[in-house]
Image (spheres, helix red, strand yellow):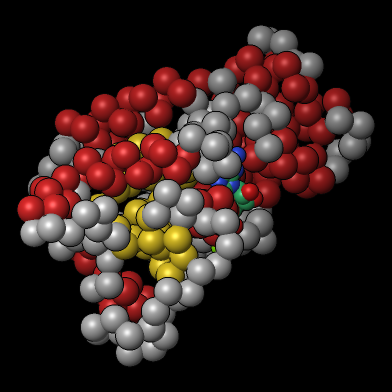
């Protein structure tokens, strides 16, 4: 399998950049894809952001299986991690984030209020691997760019802040993390959802990986989209892929069909789905 190597130097630099920016904010919004909340999370950043209040935001919840998203939220709750799931493009998004943020920072805000500081500014930043929706969320929260000030203590470079409609401040550039996939399953899940470029893995391998999960969990969407029967789903996976290729009128061009299936899945045309299941990860972090 192809593995993207992040050179140790790059990795260290990315971490250092996040650490620098962390000093400026009251809270970190870590974005992950609700369909793959573990696979789209960089495991190494956890230690770095430990020092800050932290909200895990499961984006693209509109594309994920709501049943599984609920399980994930219960899971985080049981581990005392703050987490919410949302569709970044919904009008309610700002309220959901603001409310949760105020809850997380309640002590700090109360403290400031005691000292006579009313409606204290809340400063935040988004971090996450590519394609989890950092830019989408920022753009959604913010009407237009508002440069606030560069001369805050500890700010060497001019730092742009954006202000949401209801007064949440966000660093204008999100922290970009790298995906980590020494595990082939994680690589396949990242590829299937479009988090990593399509040329890293063979499309048909990725599709076959995904088909297997759909057959076990999301048969209806698959059968509906490609006019398949229950019997069809009993075939060996490469055969099934060829059958779908034919049904799509693509003869034996299963590579082209694979691309189509990936597009369909990512656009939600096979229905909502999740690829990371709580049950697979329940012992995560119980060191
Ligand atoms: N359906 C859906 N799509 C989203 C959501 N958030 C982001 N996207 C899409 O995901 C893709 C990547 O988003 P982008 O903001 O560029 O990700 P970034 O690389 O983290 O900045 C874009 O096509 C967005 O339209 C969401 O909550 N729901
Ligand atoms: Mg972006």
For the point 27% across and 72% down, the residue is 24
Numbered label tally: 0
For the point 42% across and 49% down, the residue is 166
Q: What is the quadrant of residue 117 in the picture?
A: bottom left
For the point 66% across and 56% down, the residue is 198
Q: What is the quadrant of residue 254 in the picture?
A: top right
Image location (x, y in percent) of residue 234: 63, 16
Image location (x, y in percent) of residue 4: 49, 68
Which of the pair 265/5 is nearer the observer?
265
Answer with left or right where residue 142 lies relative to residue 12. right
Q: Residue furthest bottom?
A: 156
Q: Residue furthest top?
A: 230
Residue 180 visible in the current orientation:
no
Image location (x, y in percent) of residue 165: 48, 51
Image location (x, y in percent) of residue 126: 40, 59
Residue 169 visible in the current orientation:
yes
For the point 26% across and 53% down, the residue is 119
Identify whether 5 is placed above or below 143. Answer: below
Answer with left or right where residue 181 lies relative to residue 81. right
Identify whether 203 is placed above or below 234. Answer: below
Identify whether 171 is placed above or below 59. Answer: below
Answer with left or right where residue 185 lies relative to residue 218. left
Which of the pair 237/244 is nearer the observer?
244
């Amino acid at each position: 399998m192809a593995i993207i190597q992040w050179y140790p130097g790059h990795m260290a630099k990315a971490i250092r950049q996040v650490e620098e920016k962390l000093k400026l904010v009251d809270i970190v919004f870590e974005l992950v894809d609700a369909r793959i909340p573990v696979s789209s999370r960089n495991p190494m950043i956890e230690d770095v952001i430990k020092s800050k209040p932290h909200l895990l935001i499961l984006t693209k919840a509109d594309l994920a299986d709501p049943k599984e998203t609920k399980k994930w939220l219960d899971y985080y709750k049981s581990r005392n991690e703050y987490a919410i799931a949302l569709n970044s493009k919904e009008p309610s998004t700002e309220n959901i984030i603001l409310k949760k943020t105020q809850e997380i920072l309640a002590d700090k805000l109360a403290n400031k209020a005691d000292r006579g500081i009313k409606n204290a500014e809340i400063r935040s930043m988004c971090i996450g691997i590519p394609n989890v929706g950092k830019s989408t969320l920022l753009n959604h929260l913010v009407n237009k760019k508002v440069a606030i000030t560069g001369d805050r203590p500890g700010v060497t470079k001019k730092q742009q802040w954006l202000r949401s409609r209801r007064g949440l401040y966000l660093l204008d550039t999100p922290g970009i993390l790298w995906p980590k996939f020494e595990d082939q399953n994680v690589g396949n899940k990242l590829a299937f959802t479009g988090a990593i470029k399509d040329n890293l893995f063979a499309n048909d391998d990725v599709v076959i990986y995904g088909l297997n999960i759909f057959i076990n969990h999301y048969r209806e969407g698959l059968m509906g989209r490609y006019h398949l029967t229950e019997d069809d789903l009993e075939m060996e996976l490469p055969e099934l892929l060829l059958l779908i290729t034919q049904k799509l009128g693509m003869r034996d061009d299963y590579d082209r069909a694979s691309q189509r299936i990936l597009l369909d899945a990512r656009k939600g045309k096979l229905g909502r789905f999740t690829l990371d299941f709580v049950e697979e990860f329940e012992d995560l972090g119980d060191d």
